[in-house]
Image (cartoon, rainbow, N blue to C red):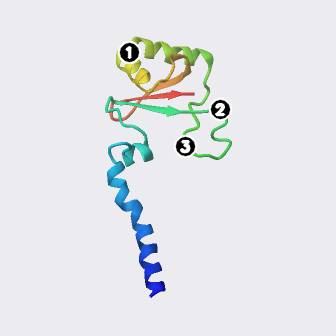
Amino acid sequence: MIRRFLNIAFAGLLLAPAMTVPAMAGEAELAAILFGRNYNDGVTAVSVSPGHAERGAGGPAGPAYQTPARMRAAQAQVSRDPVLQAAIARRKIALHNVIWVQTAANGGRIVYYR
């Protein structure tokens, strides 16, 4: 009798998160938590920190041969394009943190920032 009660209580504890997730869906979408926010503006922002590849964390290591001149060119490209300006403003990325801008195969833009 007690064992059956404990089994039912344990099953209830296991199912409790499944019941509360739909209630929390309005606050935080699962896709936004797992994959980041989708702004549907054709711009992908990629954070590249120094030493990222050396630490073995995976992901992009950033553009090779990044020089101050190339960074200035990328920042100038963003400052000339209102779509890119709006995209980095929406993501709260400062212009001086942009290190590279690339055109994706689908025609979208990829902004690498630190």
Q: Taking 3 as reference, is 19 above or below it?
A: above
Q: Where is residue 22 in the image (x, y as percent from the top left)?
A: 32, 53
Q: Could you say whether the residue bearing mark 3 is in a helix, strand or loop?
A: loop
Q: Residue at x 34, y 30 (%)?
A: 42
Local crowd at mark 2 within 10 Å, few (<14), some, or many (≥20)? few
- Report, in whole angstroms, how far the alpha carbon at label 2 lies from the one at label 3: 12 Å
Q: Taking 90 as reference, is 46 above or below it?
A: below
Q: Which amino acid does label 3 sit on?
A: Gly
**Quarter of image, res 50:** top right
- Report, in whole angstroms, how far the alpha carbon at label 3 lies from the one at label 1: 27 Å
Q: Taking 112 as reference, is 9 above or below it?
A: below
Local crowd at mark 3 within 10 Å, few (<14), some, or many (≥20)? few
Q: Residue 102 carries which label?
A: none
Label 1 belongs to which residue?
81
Q: Residue at x 40, y 63 (%)?
A: 16
Label 3 belongs to which residue?
59
Q: Which residue is drawn at 47% across and 79% down?
A: 6
Going by the picture, which residue comes out furthest to the front?
2
Q: What residue type is labelled 2?
A: Pro
Quadrant of the image containing the C terminus: top right
Q: Residue at x 55, y 14 (%)?
A: 72
Q: Where is residue 38 in the image (x, y as percent from the top left)?
A: 36, 37
Q: Depth check: 91 or 44 in front?
A: 91
